[in-house]
Image (cartoon, coloured by chain):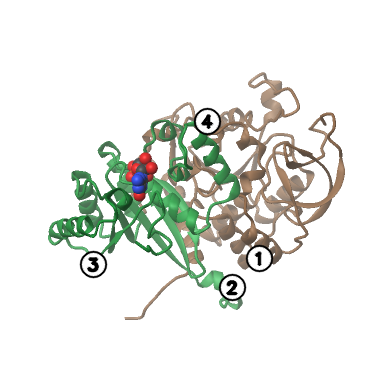
Chain colours: A brown, B green
Amino acid sequence: MISYSITHLEELEAEAIYVLREVFAQFENAALLFSGGKDSIVVSHLARKAFWPARIPFSLLHIDTGHNFPETLVFRDAYIKKIGAELIIGSVQESIDKGRVVEEKGYNASRNVLQTVTLLDTIEKYKFDCAIGGARRDEEKARAKERFFSHRDEFGQWDPKNQRPELWNIFNGRKHHGEHFRVFPISNWTEMDVWQYIYHEKIEIPSLYYSHQRESFKRDGVIMAATDFMELKEGEEIKVRTLRFRTIGDATCTGATISKAITIEEIIQEVAAARTTERGTRADDKRSEAAMEDRKKEGYF
Amino acid sequence: MTKELDNNAYLDMELLRFTTAGSVDDGKSTLIGRLLYDSKSIFIDQYEAIEASSKRKGDDYVNLALLTDGLRAEREQGITIDVAYRYYATPKRKFIIADTPGHIQYTRNMVTGASTANLALILVDARKGLLEQTQRHTFIAALLGIPHIVFCINKMDLVDYSQEVYDRIRDEIEGFTSKLDVKDIQFIPVSALIGDNVVHKSKK
Ligand SMILES: Nc1nc2c(ncn2[C@@H]2O[C@H](COP(=O)(O)OP(=O)(O)O)[C@@H](O)[C@H]2O)c(=O)[nH]1
Ligand SMILES: [Mg+2]
């Protein structure tokens, strides 16, 4: 017998591709949630591999808070064009204008929580029965609990205390009318796996991930980009820093790290030496101990 | 994946998936927390978060089980309800850990976590020995075809690290497992709470 072994990254890739094909087999109208961040880029890349030479059989769905870094949007549009996918945008601004949600007030106002309503409205509008996401279990303690195929009731809610069994590679996508699934192909990947994969597959990512000069200020120990969306408090002062982003979300809740890394190799070295998680710079998780779980229950990503 | 990078050490790593099992309160989550903590796989912000939350609950030590018990209900009740996945790596291997619940009504969640594992760590409380739930989980692990089972006789600190207690439990388990079809069964005495014989070899 020929001995055959695969490395852990190959195993993770195979797992993700299997899950993506399973989505195509089990659902009628799936969307791939695309934020322009590294995880959703990796999932899109895997989807391309899963169905190559055909195009990705899912629409890409961007929930747009309107508080973007311009670099993300430039990247998004170029990427969509390159892979020939259809882009659907769910706009938080539109949800606000329609009165579906109310804008938060104050210094730490963010549209991050509001996204959930926009996401669920968009899923309903386009009758998506599945939304594929790039969430990873190593990101956060509530995410560490989620299945690959995560069931959502007709209100888009997740019930973490009553999840379905999910044995081996058998994924159960059965649902009632109006319910949908969230599917996470890279559940088992770590931040390091994602970077290694980006490196080995030569995947393009937005420039925000590389070191650059940017006007920024410090709030609660976190370095935030100075943007039109955020008001400065007294005593907060804008300085130009050499930094990069470890994760990209809404500009109002994504912190930066001081860094000189300008290549993926250098980023990988930084990730290897990091003593905090990537979400350690995310203001949205710091709101309470169960902030992520609460948001997820309501239908967040 | 591209050929030229085959020499990269990260790419050469193998993946091992393992699961915890055993009865409620035998120390599964604590053991995983200890394993992550002592192998320095915990990030500062994660540690600070569980430190603060232990303090809030009035514990005089940092409850490492909170690393995997991530749901609100789990923290409030001090139990594991659903399987949590954790990741760490040594220079040679990547690990995916599934920390599973011990309660009988959550057995389906235990099976979910165990189904993809190649190795099961079955925890046994040294004061209680082989319980019904230990037997059930061992049986399930065998049914799922998990090739390697390690019985961790835990809470050795509460029985004065007694060789006699350890031997007695080991005999009891061997009697039970002789009827099961498992390729490889091992035994290790540990104290998950104190960290004895988990990552660092015991001096006791
Ligand atoms: N004395 C002692 N207590 C332990 C040990 N391991 C776990 N415990 C305690 O046993 C209780 C249950 O632990 P937990 O990890 O939640 O058990 P699980 O239900 O199997 O996950 C907690 O109060 C732990 O602090 C140990 O080695 N020694
Ligand atoms: Mg537990």
Residue A127 image point, x, y percent: 52, 33
How far separated are the C-alphas under marks 1 and 4? 36 Å
Q: Which residue is mark 3?
A: B183
**Of callouts 2 and 3, the N-terminal one:** 2
**Of callouts 1 and 4, the N-terminal one:** 1
- Whether residue A159 sits left or right of residue B178 in the image: it is right
How far separated are the C-alphas under marks 1 and 2? 9 Å
Q: Which residue is mark 4?
A: A294
Q: B22 or A255: nearer the eye?
A: B22
Q: A15 or A196: nearer the eye?
A: A196
Q: Chain of mark 1?
A: A
Mark 3 and ligand 1: say if the CB distance to the nearest ligand atom is below 8 Å. no
Looking at the rendered structure, whether the residues under marks 2 and 3 are on a common chain is answered as yes
Residue B193 image point, x, y percent: 39, 48
> Mark 3, residues whose alpha carbon is within 10 Å: few (<14), some, or many (≥20)?
few
Residue A40 image point, x, y percent: 60, 49
Q: Quadrant of ligand 1?
A: top left
Q: A235 or B189: nearer the eye?
A: B189
Which labelled disc corresponds to residue B2? Answer: 2
Front of the two marks 4 and 2: 4
Contact flag, marks 2 and 3 (Cβ < 8 Å): no
Report the amino acid beneath label 2: Thr
Contact flag, marks 1 and 2 (Cβ < 8 Å): yes
Q: Which residue is mark 1?
A: A202
